Image: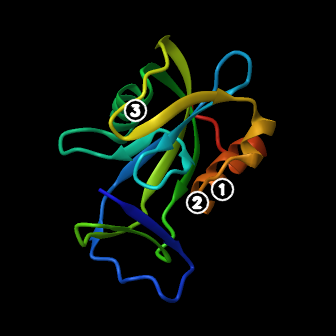
Amino acid sequence: MGRRDYEDDPDAPAANSLVPAASAVVVDEAGRILLQRRRDNGMWALPGGAMNLGESLPDCVIRETREETGYEVAIVGIVGTYSNPRHVFAYDDGEVRQEFSVCFLARPVSGQVAVSAESTDVRWFSPDQVDELPMVPSIRKRVNDWREGNMPALR
């Protein structure tokens, strides 16, 4: 299924759904960040996705990271909460989803790089390599918030 992101775009379609979601900035011991290249839009992104019924947001991001990258992670903080009503995702099936996402900070505890049905590539990048990657503005904001340390600690 294809997806198009609209942010602060007057031509964006109106949202018709709101789905809680979570993403993760996964950082290894070398300070590298784990990113996946999305199959639906070709952009580099953080692992993450929609929360299922009966699941907490932390459980959601742990599951999504495992499914999309091959890594089990431990949550060590929160990067931020992102709920811009002027940011929507339009899907080929007609759903137009308003953004509502919590981005967690995580570290890998086991696993190895694995591409999923949702991605075409999964890689570790040094923070300075991220600036050159094609990425939607909302994901770049999360990465920049992490790099700039604009996040509360989770204890």
Structural distance between the alpha carbons of marks 2 and 3: 19 Å
- Which sits earlier in the primary sequence, circle 1 or circle 3? 3
Residue density around tag 3, few if under 14, some if 14–19, many if 20 or more, within 10 Å:
many
Q: Say left or right for 122 vs 125.
A: left
Which residue in the rendered view is the most extreme toward the top?
A: 110
Q: Residue at x 75, y 30 (%)?
A: 126
Dot 2: what SS?
A: helix
Q: Name the residue under label 2.
A: 138
Q: Is the Cβ of the residue at disc 1 closer than 8 Å to that at disc 3?
A: no
Mark sitting on residue 68:
3
Task: Tell me which colouring the rendered structure shows.
Answer: rainbow
Dot 1: what SS?
A: helix
Q: Indicate the quadrant where residue 60 lies.
A: top left
Q: Name the residue under label 1.
A: 141
The amino acid at mark 1 is Lys
Structural distance between the alpha carbons of marks 1 and 3: 21 Å
Q: Is the Cβ of the residue at disc 2 closer than 8 Å to that at disc 1?
A: yes
